[in-house]
Image (cartoon, grey):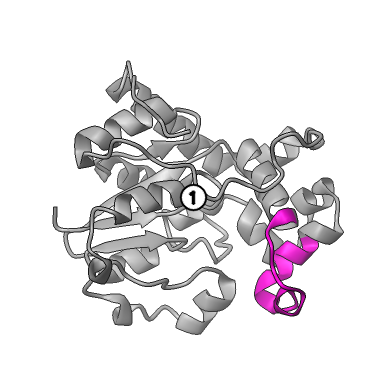
Amino acid sequence: MTGLFLFHLPKAGGLSLRAALQGLFEPAERCPVIENDTIDHIRNGGNYHFARGYRCYAGHVGVDVFRTVADGHAAVTNFRHPVARIGSLYRYFRAVPIAAPELEHPRYHAVRFARERSFEEFVTTDDPRVRVYTENQHARQLTGSPWRLDPAIDMAAAVGLIDTMPCFYVCEEPARSLAWFGERFGIATIPRDNVTPGEAGQAPLPDLSEAILAMNRCDLALHDYAVARLRALQPGGAARVAA
């Protein structure tokens, strides 16, 4: 394998997948964090040449980075239904431990917003610093950058990229996903990392499915496409998933 590039979608099992995939490479072959939010994206200004030369890339980065650094690297990604993902993201932002002084940094604006506002306000706000997390983030990631609110999304390009992937992970289909990664990369288990604190046992969030799907039509279409493709290629999918 020449190399691997993981388009890590937040709150979709990506950290667990990332840990499993990075284990296939030596530490020196793994690229450090390139960018992790809008502030990093603006700082880099589209210049990613400094990140060339690694065999393993994994992070909250998009095709703009991939086009610069990829040199025969296989692309993979992770999927989760938008309604479940946005709910998990909201709970995560409200629970993730961040020291008070650090929380005041502009990069944590969306986290502060989630802690101060209701779930409905989080989902329906026009604030672009929040919307960059909640509106078609995966589709933007697979066509440009997850940290830029593009007015148009090239769905054909996103599907074309998915079709080149040797495999991908779907949160709602862990057994089939793991079986596929086992075939392609010899991965036997994917540990459960970065589980949202307090998500289990809490009162359910208000049902805002209609509002979430209205602003995530592209992400929903890509998720459904991935599920259908996975089920067609892995009809059984019997495999052991780490508890």
- Report whether 218 appears left or right of 17: right
Q: Does the magenta stretch include residue 99?
A: yes
Above or below, comparing residue 237 to residue 116 in the picture: above
Measured as percent of width and height from the top left, residue 172 is found at 50, 29
Mark 1, residue position? 139
Residue at point 32%, 16% (across, down): 236
Residue sitting at the far left? 1
| Side of 178 where 91 appears, left or right | right
> In this view, which residue lies farthest toward the front?
243
Q: Is 9 situated left or right of 210 in this image?
A: left
- Residue type marked 1: Ala
How many numbered discs sit on the rendered protein?
1
Residue 124 versus residue 30 in the image, above or below: above
> What secondary structure do most residues of the magenta stretch adopt?
helix
87 relative position to 184: left or right:
right
Residue 11 x/y as whole percent? 56, 48
Q: Is residue 209 above or below residue 44?
A: above
Crowding near the residue tagged with mark 1, few <14, some 14–19, many ≥20 C-alpha atoms within 10 Å: many
Quadrant position of residue 70 = bottom left
Magenta-drawn stretch contains 82? no
Query: Which of the two residues, 30 or 147, is positioned nearer the viewer here?
Result: 30
- Quick check: can you spot residue 215? no
**Percent coordinates x, y for residue 95 in the rendering:** 72, 55
At 44% across and 63% down in the image, what residue appears? Answer: 61
Q: Which residue is drawn at 33% across and 21% down?
A: 237
* Helix, strand or loop under label 1: helix
Percent x, y of residue 182: 25, 34
Q: What stretch is highlighted in magenta?
A: 95-113
- The answer to whether any part of residue 198 appears in the image is yes
